[in-house]
């Protein structure tokens, strides 16, 4: 299938110049265009709609970024209706990288007011804020329009990227592999000089954890398990789901402390709050099988992948002890996207010898 398979009027829309505000389609205005609507309706239920994404991947680099983002949005809607989420992701991710790199000089977060005794110190945040504002002020009218068009393109592009990254773990891994892009997303999602309404969603997606073999150790009983973790927001989220799983397998894991009753909300909705039933530690808390640092906590607000790895696997230690601080959390199990489907599942139990090796 070649670009000639795209309707001529649809291609003409994509290739229209972007020179003034009237040329900037929003999501609703784009899909109400007759040529766009007709083409979408003709392919959305077609088993060959994957070909549309293949063509789009070759077209994105040749279009104005705003038109390219709209085409990606069109394809994202097809992904939501069953098209392969992997086909366009690389091209769309490259486009996002180019857009953010071009807008970075104009982006900064407004610095917080400093105490009087700190005002004499050099403030890099203030310097970045002043530089971004100066860069924007120096733009000529048409240049400022182009920056605004690219700003709008970023928010349009977030939507299809989210549709694709949340449906295919390969896309999530590709996103994390682009360290420069992830760094820019993190920094620019809070920009005040050039604000983005949607970029924080992609930042949240980058923080999610997908681990095929997460190791959970219970040193008190010298037991443990290998767990598959899917779509976890952070460590607090992991603790909640893991504690549910450990409650289910308490006998096999040799858990000695009284097992807390399951906390369930009506309609099986995610619990808004939870508390630690164990002292959750990093693997570095143990050496030669002994507890050497009970302050080596796994910090709840951190992402799961920030935990220490041993033998190539992320490791969490659940220590049964009454001598632990009270830790509770609220709101960390939120659903970022309908396709997040956060869960943990048991892969297998560890042997005592394997547990000893991880604690060595």
Image (cartoon, rainbow, N blue to C red):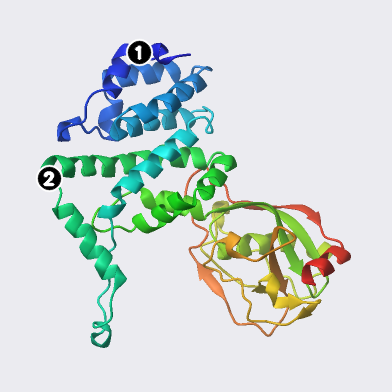
Taking depth in this image into account, of 11 and 326 the one nearest to the observer is 11
**Residue found 82% across the figure and 67% down from its top:** 357
Label 1: which secondary element: loop
Earlier along the polypeptide chain: callout 2 or callout 1?
1
Taking depth in this image into account, of 126 and 214 the one nearest to the observer is 126
Residue 253 figure quarter = bottom right
Say few, some or many: other residues with alpha carbon within 10 Å of mark 2 (under 14 / 14 to 19 / 20 or more).
few
Q: Quadrant of the C terminus?
A: bottom right
Disc marking residue 140: 2
Does 306 sit above or below residue 144?
A: below
Label 2: which secondary element: loop
**Residue found 34% across the figure and 55% down from its top:** 188
Is residue 335 in sight in this rendering?
A: no
Coordinates of residue 299 in the picture (x, y in percent)? 56, 71
For this view, does 133 lie left or right of residue 302? left
Residue lying furthest left: 141
For this view, does 252 lie left or right of residue 17? right
**Residue found 74% across the figure and 76% down from its top:** 286
Does 196 sit above or below residue 78?
A: below
Does 227 sit above or below residue 254?
A: above
Does 311 sit above or below residue 156?
A: below
Coordinates of residue 21 in the picture (x, y in percent)? 16, 35
**Residue found 34% across the figure and 31% down from its top:** 68
Marks 2 and 1 close (CB-CB < 8 Å): no
Taking depth in this image into account, of 247 and 348 the one nearest to the observer is 348
Disc marking residue 7: 1
For this view, does 51 lie left or right of residue 34? right
Is residue 85 in sight in this rendering?
A: yes
Coordinates of residue 231 in the picture (x, y in percent)? 57, 51
Question: Mark 2 or mark 1, which is nearer to you?
Answer: 2
Separation (CA) of disc 2 from disc 1: 37 Å
């Amino acid at each position: 299938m070649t670009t000639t398979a795209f309707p001529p009027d649809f291609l003409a829309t994509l290739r229209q110049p972007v020179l003034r505000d009237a040329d900037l389609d929003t999501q609703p205005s784009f899909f109400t265009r007759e040529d766009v609507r007709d083409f979408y309706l003709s392919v959305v239920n077609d088993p060959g709609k994957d070909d549309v994404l293949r063509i789009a991947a070759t077209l994105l680099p040749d279009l104005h970024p705003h038109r390219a983002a709209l085409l990606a949005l069109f394809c994202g809607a097809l992904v939501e209706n069953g098209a392969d989420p992997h086909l366009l992701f690389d091209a769309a991710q490259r486009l996002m990288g180019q857009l953010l790199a071009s807008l970075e000089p104009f982006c900064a977060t407004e610095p917080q007011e400093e105490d009087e005794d700190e005002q004499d110190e050099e403030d890099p945040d203030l310097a970045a804020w002043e530089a971004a504002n100066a860069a924007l002020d120096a733009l000529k009218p048409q240049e400022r329009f182009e920056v605004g068009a690219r700003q709008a393109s970023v928010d349009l592009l977030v939507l299809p990227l989210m549709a694709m990254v949340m449906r295919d773990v390969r896309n999530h891994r590709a996103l994390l592999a682009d360290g420069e892009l992830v760094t820019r997303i993190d920094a620019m999602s809070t920009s005040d000089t050039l604000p983005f309404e949607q970029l924080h969603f992609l930042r949240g997606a980058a923080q999610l954890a997908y681990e095929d073999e997460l190791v959970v150790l219970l040193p008190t009983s010298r037991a443990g398990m290998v767990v598959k973790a899917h779509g976890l927001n952070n460590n607090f989220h992991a603790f909640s789901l893991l504690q549910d799983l450990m409650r289910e397998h308490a006998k096999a894991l040799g858990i000695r402390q009284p097992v807390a009753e399951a906390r369930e909300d009506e309609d099986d909705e995610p619990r808004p709050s939870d508390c630690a039933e164990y002292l959750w530690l990093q693997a570095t808390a143990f050496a030669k099988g002994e507890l050497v640092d009970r302050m080596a906590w796994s910090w709840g607000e951190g992402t799961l992948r920030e935990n220490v790895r041993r033998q190539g696997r992320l490791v969490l230690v659940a220590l049964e002890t009454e001598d632990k601080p009270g830790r509770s959390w609220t709101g960390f199990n939120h659903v970022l996207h309908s396709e997040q489907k956060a869960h943990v599942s048991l892969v297998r139990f560890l042997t005592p010898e394997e547990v000893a090796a991880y604690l060595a």
